[in-house]
Image (cartoon, rainbow, N blue to C red):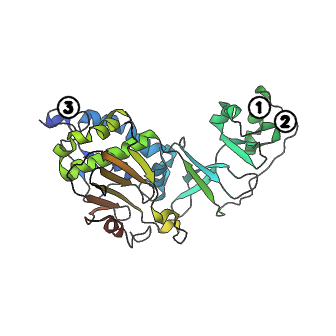
Amino acid sequence: MPTCIYCRSEKASGEFNREHVIPEAFGRFKNNLVLHNTVCSECNSRFANSIDLHLARFSAEGLERYRWGVKPAEDIKKFNYRNVRLEYDEGGDWKGLLCELIPGGGPDGLVLEPLTQVGFALTDAQGFKFYNADDFFASKWKKDPTINPSGGVRVYPISFHTRAKEHLEREGIVLTTWREDTIPVEHGQEITVSHRFQVTDDVRRVVAKVALNYVASVYGAETALRGEFDSIRRYVHTGFQPMLPVVGVNVPPWVYHPMMEEDKRPVVHWIIVRPDVTGDVFLGQVCLFGWMVYLIVLSFEATGLDGSGHFFNVSDLTAYKMPTGPKERFVDAFEGLDAQNG
């Protein structure tokens, strides 16, 4: 009977279902890598309703799905900004104003819309810090030592002033003067927005799952079940963090390179596994939308396995095998790819 690579339980074939190496929420690709009789239905369902869902609905990469057409713009209302902040970054007292993407007339079918929120003057008098309505009414700002409510309050939209004022007064803050103010941005005007986000443990676990799935896809489930992968398996399955961190984050050079426009980055997912330069550690790399690269220690022991890599072109929704070899050849596989021509 087949054995699940996560819970290590032997089960009948009917207790397994398909597992995509790259979650389908990030694209349905031709030549996709799909596991059969490898991840049991129980584990698959638990991941789908926990860490997979977190990656899709609560992460920075999850938001990218709407920018690049993997998910329709009208579905963005399902996204949760708990771990992601989009902030107005044009300077002035409205700098830091919280925004969200909504369906609209932009080139990707999305436009920015400010949230209902309240901003408090910073203690250094260098602007304001904003809280969305939920955090404002939960009075999370009261524990923030960087703000000084008596130094000034900004409320958006104007129609929210009355409720905000009443809540502040219940919290003992009475402001003697109120005036209407509007954001100095005209409809349709291009603005600069800062993108702030948190890389949570759930995100780290799911990218580790992608890497271990890839090992099973390329080398077989029997290889993924070997003892040298027990540490990363336990981390994915239970969240138990090994003593040494197993998932780090890096940024590919084209994301921060001053000569490359952001919309010219190669919009692809990729997965690479290979030994490190000493051959003593087996590593994985997972990247979604050509953005952040997650570095995964799949095994702290030599595995005897060679390197392998695939990339998934978001433009033509096709998966491709990378050339095997030195690191430079993996990087060369992306040459000429961009958001326009794939």
Q: Secondary structure at mark 2?
A: loop
SS under mark 3: loop
Q: Are marks 2 and 1 in contact (CB under 8 Å)?
A: yes
Q: What residue sits right under mark 3 in the picture? A: 9
Image: 92 above or below 234: below
Q: What amino acid type should be assigned to the residue bearing mark 1?
A: Leu
Q: CA distance from mark 2 to mark 1?
A: 9 Å
**Amino acid type indicated by mark 2:** Leu
Q: Residue under label 1, please give it.
A: 168
Question: On the rendered structure, is 237 left or right of 163?
Answer: left
Which of the pair 96/105 is nearer the observer? Answer: 96
Closer to the eye: label 3 or 2: 3
**Residue under the point 56% across and 52% down:** 101
**Where in the figure is residue 88, as x and y percent of width and height?**
66, 54
Task: Read off the residue under disc 2.
Answer: 175
Q: Earlier in the sequence, mark 2 or mark 1?
A: 1
User: Which of disc 1 and disc 3 is earlier in sequence?
Assistant: 3
Label 1 CA crowd tier, 10 Å (few <14, some 14–19, many 20+): some
Residue 303 vs residue 49, the one in the foreground: 303
Mark 1: which secondary structure?
Answer: helix
Q: Is residue 306 left or right of residue 342?
A: left
What x and y, as percent, mark residue 120? 74, 41
Q: Position of residue 146 (x, y in %)?
A: 71, 40
Q: Which mark is residue 247?
A: none
Q: Earlier in the sequence, mark 3 or mark 2?
A: 3
Does 237 appear above or below 198?
above
User: Residue at position x 25%, y 53% from top?
Assistant: 33
- Callout 3, which amino acid? Ser
Which tag is nearer the camera, tag 3 or tag 1?
3
